[in-house]
Image (tube, rainbow, N blue to C red):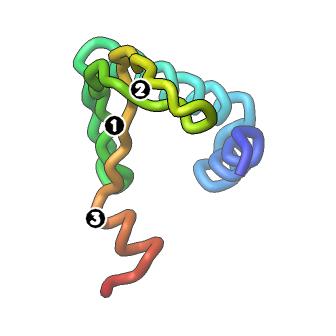
Amino acid sequence: MTQTQISAYLAEKVGISKKQAKSTLDELAALVVKQLKKEGKLRLAGVGIFTKRRSKARMGRNPATGQEIKIPARTRLRITPAKALKDAVLGTR
């Protein structure tokens, strides 16, 4: 589903214009970025937890040549889905 499709869906469901729905989505995305930069963690009820994680530098191996290479430390994003989302999509086991 694209951002345009999501905007159209929200506009119809909530009863607002498509422009307002797109603006709302843009603000939500900006809020997620702002919070992750500031605190490194954001919890959206029913969706999941977005976290910023720091990975350590490590040694790896080039699979083509077998040569050892150093993999630098970096920051990654991780999304842990909420239990409600997992149950809704995958069903209870």
Q: Which residue is drawn at 31% across and 66% down?
A: 84
Query: On residue 83, which mark appears?
Result: 3
Q: Residue at x 59, y 31 (%)?
A: 65
Pinpoint residue 93: horizontal percent, then vertical percent.
31, 87
User: So how many labels did they put on this image?
Assistant: 3
In the picture of the structure, the residue carrying the numbered disc 1 is 50
Q: How crowded is mark 2: few (under 14 residues within 10 Å), some or many (20 or more)?
A: some
Q: Closer to the N terminus: mark 1 or mark 2?
A: 2
**Residue type indicated by callout 3:** Lys
Splitting the image into 4 quarters, where does residue 92 fall?
A: bottom left
Pinpoint residue 60: horizontal percent, then vertical percent.
40, 29
Instruction: Calculate the distance from the C-alpha at mark 1 to the C-alpha at mark 3.
Output: 14 Å
Disc 2 is placed on an element classified as helix
Between disc 1 and disc 2, the foreground one is: 1
Instruction: Calculate the distance from the C-alpha at mark 2 to the C-alpha at mark 3.
Output: 20 Å
Side (left or right) of 13 relative to 46: right
Q: Residue at x 45, y 20 (%)?
A: 69
In the picture of the structure, the residue carrying the numbered disc 2 is 32
Q: Residue at x 67, y 31 (%)?
A: 22
Pinpoint residue 75: horizontal percent, then vertical percent.
36, 20
**Residue type indicated by callout 1:** Phe
Mark 1 touching mark 2, by CB under 8 A?
yes
